[in-house]
Amino acid sequence: MNDLLQLFIFAQTPLEELRAWLAATPHRFERFAPGERIIAQGVECRSALLLTAGKANTEMVQDGRDLSIDVLKAPMLLASAFLFGSAATECEVWTVNKEALFDFMLQHPEAMRRFVAEVSDRTQFLSRRLRQLTLQSLRSRVLDFLHERGRMESVQTAAQQLGVQRPSLSRVLSDLAAEGRVEKRDGAFVAVELPSDEL
């Protein structure tokens, strides 16, 4: 129960009030093992999924391949992320009736404001990811990936996250390494910071 209070939507809700609301609301608590599917793409979202522990992958299926969009960390309202996938680590998820959650937000305007802000932030993130995946060259996407994350531990995992085949990513990394833009340190690829006049 206390883990639900960590979610932004319930942050200012007294524990007894949350208990009373849950007692009157259809809900269930589930644990998911790493790699286990939480919800499939395209399934009608009839409930709100509240991630209270662990990490969850958001994915899209494209041409038979899973394209990694993001890794969501608890506490998080998964229903605001639009795309779901599998558990990245062991996860704890509360599934709550969607209409009951809307009613809760109507009775708690601050929770509604936080929900709208969260949806707006996720929409902006997904817009940026869509631009990266569709408009940027693979070379630009690889450099952005390295600048954002610091290092690329696994080419296979990064290929999935970038939505490309592993050989294509390996070729780009080789080209960038030959140009001195990336290098391998301790088994991982990292971006090399070049002087501005060499960019």
Image (cartoon, rainbow, N blue to C red):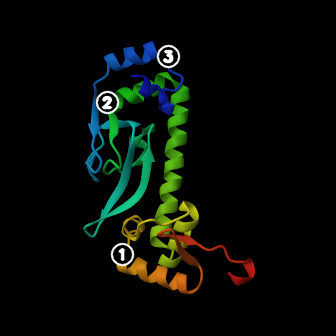
Nearest the eye: 58 or 2: 2
User: Residue 45, percent across and down?
Assistant: 30, 42
Say whether disc 1 or disc 3 marks the residue closer to the N-terminus: 3
Q: What residue did someone put label 2 on?
A: 97
What is the quadrant of the C terminus in the image? bottom right
Note whether 188 is above or below 109 in the view shown: below
Residue at disc 2, secondary structure: strand
Residue at the (62%, 74%) spot, across then down = 192
Asked if the residue at tag 3 contacts the one at tag 1, i.e. Cβ–Cβ closer than 8 Å, the answer is no
User: Residue 175, percent across and down?
Assistant: 50, 85
Q: Please state which of the two labelled residues, at mark 3 or mark 2, is closer to the viewer.
A: 3
Residue 14's tag is 3
Residue 20's tag is none
Residue at disc 3, secondary structure: loop
Residue at the (29%, 53%) spot, across then down = 41
Calculate the distance from the C-alpha at mark 1 to the C-alpha at mark 2. 41 Å
Q: What residue did someone put label 1 on?
A: 166
Determine which quarter of the picture holds residue 181.
Answer: bottom right
Amino acid type indicated by mark 1: Arg
Say whether disc 1 or disc 2 marks the residue closer to the N-terminus: 2
Residue at the (53%, 46%) spot, across then down = 120
